[in-house]
Amino acid sequence: MKLLKLKLYQNHMTIKEEGDKKIFSTRDLYLASTLITLHFPLLGIDMQIEGVKSRAIGYFNFEENQALLEARSKYNQGLLLIEPRMFITNMQSLKAEVVNFQQNPNSALE
């Protein structure tokens, strides 16, 4: 089995609190795909209109916990190895969700 090593590029991240849990949010498609490939559940996608061209940007939400912090740290250091086909499949699925929202802003994303 081949493994894919990813390098970090500066990503936009935020942490917010919802009730008693912390939510980690990123617009970095590669990081979100990596986390999903590592079996971190996606809680949802928040869409925001940003930029000069007013395009919808997807912010991918995950529950923040110690395992996620460790995975992010390894991702930032370029130390993660993941299965490339699953990574690409997950990335294409996430991108399709964002593109679907751009084409149909009235679609319900939960």
Image (cartoon, rainbow, N blue to C red):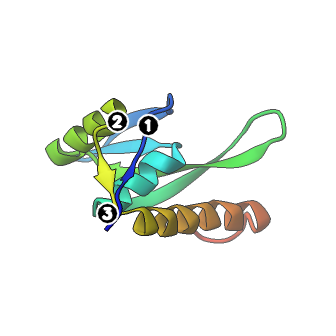
Q: Nearer the viewer, residue 78 or 21?
A: 78
x%, y% of residue 87? 44, 62
The residue wearing badge 3 is 41
Which residue sits at x=31%, y=68%? 1
Mark 3: which secondary structure? loop
Q: Nearest to the eye among marks 1 and 3: give it.
A: 1
Residue occupying the far right of the picture: 53
Q: Residues within 10 Å of mark 1 (few under 14, many from 20)?
A: some
Left or right position of 22 against 100: left
Asked if the residues shown at circle 1 and circle 2 are in contact, with their CB atoms under 8 angstroms apart, the answer is: yes
x%, y% of residue 19? 26, 47
Q: Residue 78 carries which label?
A: 2
**Which amino acid type is shown beneath numbered disc 3?**
Pro
Mark 2: which secondary structure? loop
Q: Distance between the residues labelled 1 and 3?
A: 22 Å
**Which amino acid type is shown beneath numbered disc 1?**
Lys
Which residue sits at x=73%, y=63%? 105
Residue occupying the far front of the picture: 1
Q: Nearer the viewer, residue 71 or 78?
A: 78
